[in-house]
Amino acid sequence: MKAPTMKPNLRNQQRVDVVSDIVIETPDGCQLTCKTSNLSRTGVMISCNQETAGQLIPHLKAPAPGNLMSVKARFSVPVIAIQPVSILANGNIVYLRRIARDEFQLGIQFADFEGNGLDYVDRYVRKLLANTCKPA
């Protein structure tokens, strides 16, 4: 009898729904603006149309394990109430799913951050999680 295979949990951190602009830069320098769907300490889910998804993932072929598709992600989080903080993270596209006729979701797993980016993302996610867990 063959043992059941388990799908690895690519996002082992709690996710928070966040809709904001995010710029994804490919290794050849192409910059594409998308929308975030959710964010965790270890990655981000983005939404985009078919044309943009095709520019990020050639032939819209789902990423295979071990075949990393490197990108840079630039987005802002409102850690400081007066002014949002800009985050620059290197990461890899690890997930692709078609949601609708012209809507795709791509999962980006963070590899590293510039400066205090990880700390800012961590604080922002914790703040949003704390707000969703409060009793009404």
Image (cartoon, grey):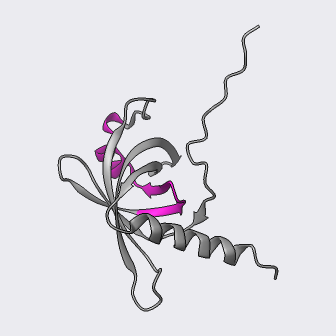
Residue 95 % position (x, y): 48, 42
Relative to the observer, which residue lies in front, 49 or 83? 83
Classify residue 100 as left or right of residue 54. Answer: right
> What are the residue bounds of the magenta stretch?
35-59
Residue placed farthest to the top in the image? 1
User: Is residue 99 placed above or below 40 in the rendered structure?
Assistant: above
Q: Residue furthest bottom?
A: 82
Q: Is residue 85 above or below residue 44?
A: below
Give left or right: position of 10 versus 63.
Answer: right
Q: Please say if 79 is above or below 25.
A: below
Is 64 situated left or right of 6 in this image?
left
- Place of residue 86 in the rendered image (x, y in percent of width and height, measured from the top left): 34, 73
Residue found at x 40% / y 33%: 61
Quick one: which residue is furthest to the right in this view? 135
| Residue at 38% across, 69% down | 116
Quadrant position of the C terminus in the picture: bottom right
Q: Percent from the top left, x then y, of residue 132?
A: 70, 74
- Residue 95 is a magenta residue: no
Q: Nearer the viewer, residue 32 or 131?
A: 131
Front-most of 110 and 56?
Answer: 110
Q: Quadrant of the N terminus?
A: top right
Asked whether, in this view, residue 88 is left or right of residue 4, the answer is: left
- Displayed quadrant of residue 32: bottom left
Q: Quadrant of residue 74?
A: bottom left
